[in-house]
Amino acid sequence: MAKQIKLIWDFRGPAAEKTAEHHEIHLKEFISAEKLDLNITGYTVITDMHSIAYLVVNEKEMIAVRDALKPHRGELYTTK
């Protein structure tokens, strides 16, 4: 199985949750427009002042998606 990479965008401040939630909409639009292999997105509230939005891609797609969308960070994605 190919490695999967979780690309992450951090949002901070009182509007972080709403911003992360809205960013996920754009990530889903990107998946559709670019016909990516995976359709895994989401957002997570870390604290009341920090939330993240994320997109999971196959390793072979990571560089192109990273260059297009400029995530803040990435990590190896594993299902729990």
Image (spheres, helix red, strand yellow):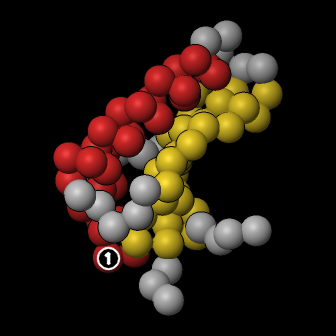
Q: Give the image location of residue 70, x and y in percent.
A: 34, 45
Task: Decide which of 22, 7 is in the foreground and name it.
Answer: 22
Q: Give the image location of residue 16, x and y in percent.
A: 61, 20
In this view, the residue farthest toward the right is 47
Residue 71: name its quadrant: top left
Residue at x 38% of width, y 42% of height: 28
Quadrant that contains the C terminus: bottom right
Task: Decide which of 23, 40 is in the foreground and name it.
Answer: 40
State whether residue 71 is above or below residue 20.
below
Residue at x 52% of width, y 20% of height: 19
Q: Give the image location of residue 41, x and y in percent.
A: 51, 48
In this view, the residue farthest toward the left is 33
Instruction: Please say whether residue 7 is visible from this viewpoint.
Output: no
Residue 52: name its quadrant: top right
What element does badge 1 sit on? helix
Q: How many marks?
A: 1
The residue at which mark 1 appears reads as 60
State whether residue 5 is above or below residue 55.
below
Give the side of residue 39 with respect to residue 10, left or right.
left
Give the side of residue 5 with respect to residue 52, left or right.
left
Q: Amino acid at mark 1?
A: Lys
